[in-house]
Image: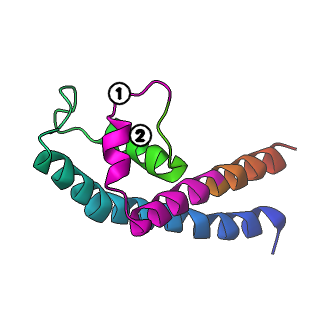
């Protein structure tokens, strides 16, 4: 087995982990957090019109970091009040597996270019 084939196989594991953990986060944690915010009359953000791309990535980053950002469009303090350990584990798994996937993809790209 050549090195680039090995990297593709090894890169598939964190990519599947990233996809699965992000899906679980959106289906469980994000719905839970949104319900808690609606219960506290915080509601959805004015700019969030059903599109969830930025909402998912910013929420995963906030939950994985565990502390409010200096400048944010989300209500960080209110969201962090409702975070469970399960949510934090999913968010960190999603972030770290994404970073590993990108790193392996970059290594594979540069090996194939040489």
Q: In this view, does 20 lie above or below 55?
A: below
Q: Does the magenta stretch include residue 20?
A: no
Q: Residue at x 37, y 40 (%)?
A: 77
Give the magenta part as a residue range. 70-99
Q: Name the residue under label 1.
A: 73
Q: Mark 2 points at which residue?
A: 58
Q: What element does badge 2 sit on? A: helix
Q: In this view, does 92 lie to the left or right of 8?
A: left
Give whichever of 54, 40 is nearer the camera: 40
- Residue 51 locus on image (x, y percent): 23, 38
- Residue 65 locus on image (x, y percent): 54, 47
Q: Is residue 53 visible?
A: no
Q: Do the residues labelled 2 and 1 touch (CB within 8 Å)?
A: yes
Q: What is the residue that sits farthest to the right in this orientation?
A: 114
Q: In this view, does 15 lie to the left or right of 112?
A: left
Q: What element does badge 1 sit on? A: loop
Q: Can residue 22 be seen in this view?
A: yes
- Residue 95 locus on image (x, y percent): 55, 53
């Amino acid at each position: 087995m050549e090195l680039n084939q090995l990297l593709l196989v090894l890169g598939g594991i964190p990519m599947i982990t990233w996809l699965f953990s992000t899906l679980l986060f959106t289906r469980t944690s994000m719905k839970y957090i949104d319900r808690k915010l609606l219960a506290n009359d915080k509601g959805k953000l004015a700019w969030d019109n059903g599109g969830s791309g930025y909402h998912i990535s910013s929420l995963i980053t906030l939950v994985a970091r565990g502390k409010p950002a200096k400048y944010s469009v989300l209500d960080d303090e209110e969201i962090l009040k409702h975070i469970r350990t399960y949510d934090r584990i999913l968010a960190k798994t999603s972030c770290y597996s994404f970073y590993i996937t990108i790193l392996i993809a970059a290594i594979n790209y540069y090996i194939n270019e040489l």
